[in-house]
Each structure stands twice: as C-alpha cells, then as structure tokens.
Image (tube, rainbow, N blue to C red):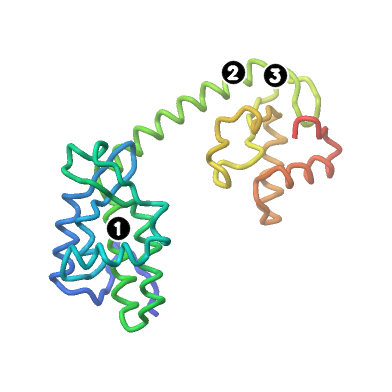
Amino acid sequence: MKKIEISDKGKITLETTLTQGQISKFNGLIQKMIIEDGAAYIPIDELHGVLLTNSRDRAKVIINNYRDTVKAYLVTDPIRFQKYGVIAAIRPVGLYNLLETLAEANPKRASDYRGSLALLAYIVAKHPQLALSSSIEAKYKEAVQNSVVAKLKRTHNICQLSTETFTNDDEKHVHHIEGQSEDPSLANDEKNLIVIKGRIHIDYHNWINMQQLATNRYTLKQYAVKNNYSLAAI
C-alpha cells in the first residue's frame, strides 16, 4: 500500500473501485442528508448509493437483513422528519459498521464496500452544515468551560495537590483529572476538575508525556504519591 500523501493545499487523492454511476449517487446523497442538532441522518430511502445496490428496495432488504447491526442507529420517527418527507433515517456510524460487516461477509466486494465507507465518511466530515453546527457547539462549550474554570479559581485559594496557599507569584491552573481527550463528557464536570499551581500542572503533563501515559485519575495519583502530594481531591 502506498503512503498517504498530502498536497500543499491540504488535499489527498484516493483511488477507488467505485464506478462513475455510484459516485453520482453519493453526490445526490449530499443534498438529501438531514442535519439536526449537530448530527447527520441519512434517509432510509437514499441508501442505495451507499450500499451499492441498483434499487432503493434492495437497500432496504439489506438493512432488514442486518437490523441487529444497525438498530442502535436507526431513527424511525415520521413526525420528527415530517418536514423532510422522511419516515426513517440512520446515523452514519450505523452505516460505517454495516459496510465493514458487508465487506467481511463478501470478500469479493470488500474493496467496494470499504470505498463506499470512505466516501461516506468524507461527505459527513466536509458537510458545511455539520461544520457550522460543530463550530457553534464548540464555542458554547468553551464559554461554559471558561465560566466553570473562573468559578473554581475564585473558590480555591489552596493548591489541591501541594496544599500550599497560592501566592501572587503562582499561576492558578484548573486540571482535568480525566483528560478532555480521554473523556470529553467530563470536560465541565467540577468533580473532574482540581485547582493546582501552574508549575505542578506543567510538571505533571511533562511527566506523563515522557512516560507516554494517559491523563487520568490513576496517573495523577501516581504523580501525587511520587511527589508526596495530597490525594484528597483526586
């Protein structure tokens, strides 16, 4: 397999076994995709392109045959999607799972199914409405986090690891016990946040980076024990 190469303009060229007709169906799918609350939904009647079939009915048969694979991602709600004229839709992640399952079940068409998966992922990643929605949501979450961080900094006058009082020379840092990358759902959970001195915060992250460890409760406890810090807030 060749290395993935990226152009100066940030573009990657991919080879595919899909036909021009199949690609055309994907282009049509872009217009039919439903975007709500920052999530994408694909109408059940528009899966013939993704599933590489010649008819919508055949695509529905595949969905029914693999219902156990996709049922967690199916949304059957005529009222919710009424304005789109859609009875049911599926989240893209359900199709990712289904396409990989089909590739494993039918090795002869594995490249086609995985090519379809790659194209679908690209469409979702580049969809302008999703990008805008994600940007708005990110700004909102950042504002909430800034508010929580400011509150904690006002509340704590003692470093929760060293138990030393903050001086005018100390920077107050708010540390995520379970890292944001490891568990984004805890990003603004005050039970997952501690206020510590900046130099300690930097030293902890330098230590876990050097050891190639994760940002989590276990490594923070290890670090605290190693430096004779308090475990009370961890």
Which residue shows up at 18% across the image and 63% down it?
56
Badge 3 marks a residue whose secondary structure is loop
Disc 1 to disc 2, C-alpha distance: 40 Å
Q: Disc number at residue 98?
A: none
Which callout, 3 or 2, points at the residue further toward the start of the chain? 2
Q: Which residue is mark 1?
A: 122
Relative to 231, residue 112 above or below: below
Badge 1 marks a residue whose secondary structure is helix
In the image: residue 139, left or right of residue 85: right
Q: Which residue is mark 3?
A: 156
Q: Which residue is mark 2?
A: 151
Relative to 65, residue 218 above or below: above
Quarter assignment of residue 11: bottom left
Say which of marks 1 and 2 sits in front. Answer: 1
Q: Which amino acid type is shown beneath numbered disc 1?
A: Tyr
Label 3 packing within 10 angstroms: few (<14), some (14-19), many (20+)? some
Which residue shows up at 70% across the image and 19% down it?
156
- Considering depth in this image, is 1 or 60 the residue closer to the camera? 60
Q: Which amino acid type is shown beneath numbered disc 2?
A: Lys
**What is the x, y in percent for residue 188?**
55, 30
Which residue shows up at 37% across the image and 65% down it?
66
